[in-house]
Amino acid sequence: MFIPSAFAQAAPAASAGSSTAAMFVQVAPLLLIFVVFYFLLIRPQQTQMKKHRAKLAAVKKGDQVVTGGGLIGKVTRVDETYVDVDLGANMKVKALKATLSDVIDPTTAKPAND
C-alpha cells in the first residue's frame, strides 16, 4: 500500500520551457563527447587514410615498397589494381596495389646494415 501511494503523490509536471532546458543539459555532454572524438580520432584517421591512398595511387616503376606481409621490394610494373614487385634474386610477386603498406622514399631510406 505504501509504494502505490508514493507514486500517486508524484511531483506536478514541469513547464515546457524547463523541460527543453533539462533535455539540453542531458544531451550536451553526449554532443561534447562526440565532438571530442571527431577531432581527436575520426578526423586525423581520415586525413591519414587520404594521404595513404594518394601515396598508393602515385606508385610508379622503380619505387621501393613494403607489402602488407612485410616484404620489401622494387616495383617493376604497375597496373590499375596490381603491381609486380621484384624481391631480388629473380623472385617476382604480383600484389594488389591496395595491400601495399608503404612506399619507401629512397632519399630518406637508410641501408639496413648502417
Image (cartoon, rainbow, N blue to C red):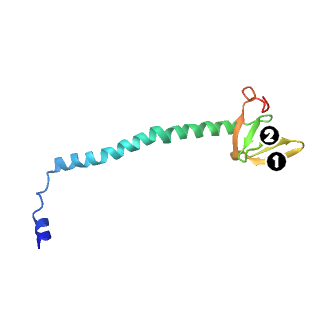
Indicate the secondary structure of the residue bearing disc 1: strand
Give the x, y percent position of residue 78.
Answer: 78, 41
Residue drawn at x 40%, y 41% as measured from the top left: 35
Circle 2 residue? 73
114 versus 47 height, above or below: above
What amino acid is at disc 1?
Val
Residue sitting at the far bottom: 1
Location of the N terminus by quadrant is bottom left
Instruction: State the image quarter where residue 63 is shown.
Output: top right
Residue drawn at x 58%, y 38% as measured from the top left: 48
Residue sitting at the far front: 114
Give the x, y percent position of residue 66.
Answer: 73, 41
97 versus 104 height, above or below: below
Disc 2/disc 1 C-alpha distance (Å) = 9 Å
Indicate the secondary structure of the residue bearing disc 2: strand
Circle 1 residue? 93
What amino acid is at disc 2?
Gly
Label 2 close to label 1 by CB (< 8 Å): yes
Relative depth, front residue between 8 and 77: 8
Relative depth, front residue between 22 and 53: 22
* Tag of residue 38: none
Residue drawn at x 78%, y 33% as measured from the top left: 112
Location of the C terminus by quadrant is top right
Of the two numbered discs 2 and 1 on the same chain, state the one appearing first in sequence.
2
Q: In the rendered view, does 51 fall on the left or right side of 30?
A: right
Q: Residues within 10 Å of mark 2 (few under 14, many from 20)?
A: many
Relative depth, front residue between 79 and 50: 50
Residue sitting at the far top: 107
Relative depth, front residue between 55 and 8: 8
Give the x, y percent position of residue 90.
Answer: 90, 43
Q: In the rendered view, does 84 fall on the left or right side of 5?
A: right
Give the x, y percent position of residue 56.
Answer: 68, 39
